[in-house]
Image (cartoon, rainbow, N blue to C red):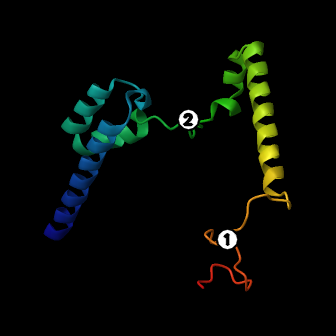
């Protein structure tokens, strides 16, 4: 019987400490009923009963995961942009896409005027071996 009481006391103490920590780390917006300070007093003064009340009444449920969006994916943010700012942004994107396309076409040009020096590991040497040392 003494062992059972010792185990129950240990479990009650662990539960009490867990509820104190849980109550302390929850943001004030997630406390229902009374303020965060009042819940701390209830949980500390009424060890097991305060913890049970905390989990049943006081601890608010999470409303769901908070979705963080990039500004260009947030319809609310995009709605606040002025039409001139949107047009300017669209023009900038168009110019950047043109520059990227131009750079891609230059890189794919088979008539590359740069001579192959052998210094570049991507260049082939005279025997057709990549990066070979003479």
Foreground residue among 115 and 78 = 115
Image side of residue 96 versus residue 33, left or right: right
Locate residue 94, reporting x and y percent: 81, 32
Image side of residue 133 versus residue 112, left or right: left
Locate residue 49, reporting x and y percent: 28, 41
Q: Which mark is residue 122?
A: 1
Q: Which mark is residue 29?
A: none
The quadrant holding residue 55 is top left
**Residue in the image at 18% along x and 63% along y:** 5
Secondary structure, mark 1, is: loop
**Residue in the image at 73% along x and 25% along y:** 89
- For disc 2, the marked residue is 63
Q: Quadrant of the N terminus?
A: bottom left
**Residue in the image at 78% along x and 32% along y:** 95
Locate residue 26, reporting x and y percent: 37, 36
The quadrant holding residue 41 is top left
Q: CB of mark 2 within 8 Å of CB of mark 1?
A: no
Q: Is residue 89 above or below residue 4?
A: above
Foreground residue among 83 and 71 = 83
Locate residue 127, reporting x and y percent: 73, 86
The quadrant holding residue 8 is bottom left
Foreground residue among 124 and 27 = 124
Pair 2/1: label in front = 1
Decide which of tag 2 and tag 1 comes sooner along the chain: 2
Secondary structure, mark 2, is: loop
Q: Is residue 30 visible?
A: yes
**Residue in the image at 42% along x and 39% along y:** 56
Q: Is residue 53 visible?
A: no
Q: Quadrant of the C terminus?
A: bottom right
Foreground residue among 130 and 88 = 130
């Amino acid at each position: 019987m003494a062992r059972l009481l010792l185990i129950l006391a240990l479990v009650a103490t662990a539960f009490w400490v867990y509820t104190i920590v849980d109550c302390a780390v929850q943001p004030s917006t997630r406390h229902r009923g009374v303020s965060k300070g009042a819940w701390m007093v209830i949980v500390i003064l009424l060890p097991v009963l305060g913890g049970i009340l905390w989990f049943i009444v006081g601890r608010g449920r999470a409303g769901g995961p908070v979705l963080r969006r990039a500004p260009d994916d947030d319809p609310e943010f995009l709605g606040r942009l002025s039409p001139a700012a949107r047009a300017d942004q669209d023009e900038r994107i168009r110019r950047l896409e043109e520059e990227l396309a131009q750079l891609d076409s230059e890189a794919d040009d088979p008539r590359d005027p740069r001579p192959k020096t052998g210094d570049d590991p991507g260049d082939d040497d005279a025997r057709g071996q990549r990066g070979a040392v003479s």
